[in-house]
Image: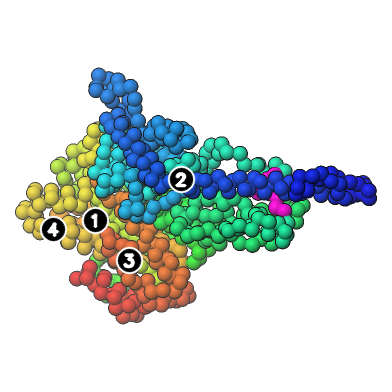
Amino acid sequence: MADSKSAGSEVLHTDTNGYSKKSSLSLQEAFLNFRKRRMKELRNSLKAAEREKALVDESCIAILRQKFVDQAKQYLGVPYAKRYHEPGSPHYDSPLFLDCCGLVRRVVRDLKEDLGFDIGRWNQSYQFDTLPIKLDRVEAMKPGDLVFVSAIYYNEKKKKQHHNMVHVEIWLGEGEKTIGARWQRQHVQIHDSYQYVSKSYHSMRYHFRSIETWLKGICRSYCSEHSWASSTHFIPGSRSIFSLDCFEEDEDAEDSESEDKPGGSGGEKPIELTETDGDLCLRDKTVKKGATPTTSARQPRSPIRRMSRKRPSTKPSAPTFYIGGGNGVSLVEGALLGMGWKRTDDRFSTDFTLKWVELKRQINYREFKEGQQLVNHISNINMLTTKIGLLDSLRDYCQLKGRRARPSLTLSEFVPETYKLDLKSEREVFYGTFKDGDVWICKPTGSNQGKGIFLVKNLDKFRLDVEAGVEATLNGRRSRLSSRIVQRYIQSPLLLCGRKFDIRAYLLIAHTTPYVVFYHHGYVRLSLQQYSVTSSELAAHLTNQYVQKRDPLYSDMKEDTVWTFEQLQKYLNANLATAKNLPSDWVFTQFTKQMQHIMLSCFHSVKHKLECRLGFFELLGFDFMIDSEMKVWLIEVNINPALHTNCNGLKQVIPPLVTETLHVVVELFEKSRHRQPLFPISSYSNLQLLHQETGLKCTPSVMSTLHHHVVPETAGGDARCHSDETVQIESQLVA
């Protein structure tokens, strides 16, 4: 192929005086020069446009702001949406309906001649992305600026918006007043404050955005995550020979001198603003709002190589989290997003900071990175959360305590008489214990939500079923009666308004190296049906929400299936305090103390056996019953306690429980990683500290020895080296 700059080739070019003359430049070189001049013209025209916008009279901006607010006021009284109003009502036949983003869109379109653009059709998420200037305080807000609200819907089936943006209102400039369409069954109105409480979503955060860019005629997305409509202004594309992104000419002394102007060299690319976590950013360099963007000298680049103008971000990426299953997803997500974390949906990825799942099998413990990751299940927690595992652990613990000293709480004092059906010796004891008129309850060892539970009133029939199941198991066939327990039924439970109830409370193992354990109050679960020990309806005997939801009365009476501890105390004071000789605060003193004592006994029964790794934590649901003599019984321990908020009582308890759990777990994790003291803990208020260990742990070999031998009691009362603070916390419960 011939050289493009062959001898004798001549090209006409124009000199600085406009005269054409011959040159010895090749066609290739002449084209590159032409391209260079054309690119400079494009840059200069874009810079001129930016300077022209910057020179807009501020007084005109102020007038336009007020016009924006006044135009919004023209829509006061316009209803939210037709579907929320009954036929024949005043708003049903309204000629116009406006929701929150519809109001903003309508005002902008009314003023499009003044603003110089027509806003897109999308919702508040789009409007948020087109306003890059973040205001960090209320005092900085001006009339017409927008208040955006991000939140998590209680209804997990509700469509999730970009940035979780659920609402927007217009700032009036009169105190904290805003104008907006806030309530579905109402209309556009003036609100005394931008802050409010919603029944549809939680974890609300307010974002203040200036409309300054709109007032200067700029409306485009500044978000790198979401692609909305592209700009109407011409910018050469990446495939254009005049592209400003993919190709940069060498800058020599002559070029720099000829374009030597304040603010940068002639080869400088027009400044593009984007937003990253609230900061306005140049394409090449991040600057905080209020700072002056500056340019830097560039190194010469090859005219042939395609070079990326983006530099790798030096800002650390946000921690990521994965949520598996559908239990409490919105609450967990809302709490972590509020902490600045980001969600990933890749369930197979090992590159996460926190994983929250329903089942242990969703966690790959072999790939777990201790000290770098958090997972919400301890690998062998089943020795506490299955019915047989709990029974075995408590039996071993109470037997060991009995050898060393009289235990403060014996097993029979808080666990109803229980036998394992998979052991012949225990089955025989049960058969001999059963008396006519007895009622026992049979439960599968690893199920929850009341699945597989039934009452045992006829021993002969039950015995035949059990033995047939045992034979089937021996022959390699599955049996519904394998891996089960049978437990004496509490036939005289305390009743509330004639209905059976139980109590859910929470134990949080927030840290395992060393142990830090908390108690969190729960709620009362009531049956919808009147209680009778002879009732054949399972819903009269089992009080959990999974069973109660199947009752035809549930939709009308669901608010009465959950009581708070305050409601329970109020009922006891009004109906039973005198007859039972109870103090007026029995629920929050004697009853809570007994629950905590039982929970600690359960924890101590397994703490030497649990696998302890930095990053393991566990939120457990403990279920209790109170009998007619006001005695407290442990029913079971749940590994995946329900985090639903389908009634008001649950909304008061569950969201703060989840939020505080995550804050405490993360705080302790970060302190351990950085070798900082764990206490004091700043992120908890409702949780109550039950167990704290600050001393060294025994080695695994020593712990293994403890499982089989009686060990002399240490100063802390067990095989770990306790601090005096731990002993004091637990001794207050035992006292």
Residue at 66%, 61% in the rendered image: 298
| Residue for badge 3 | 682
Q: Is disc 4 placed on a helix, strand or loop?
A: loop
Residue under pointer 2: 56
Q: Residue at x 46, y 45 (%)?
A: 56
Q: Main secondary structure of the magenta part?
A: loop
Secondary structure found at label 3: loop
Q: Identity of the amino acid at label 1? A: Trp
Q: Is residue 650 magenta?
A: no
Q: Which badge, 1 or 3, is on the more N-terminal residue?
A: 1
Quadrant for the C terminus in the image: bottom left
Q: Which residue is mark 4?
A: 585
Residue 371 relative to residue 449: left or right: right
| Mark 4 or 2, closer to the camera | 2
Of labels 3 and 2, earlier in sequence is: 2
The one nearer the camera, 553 or 531, is 553
Residue 633: which disc?
Answer: 1
Please tell me whether mark 1 or mark 3 is closer to you in this view.
3
Q: Residues within 10 Å of mark 4 (few under 14, many from 20)?
A: some
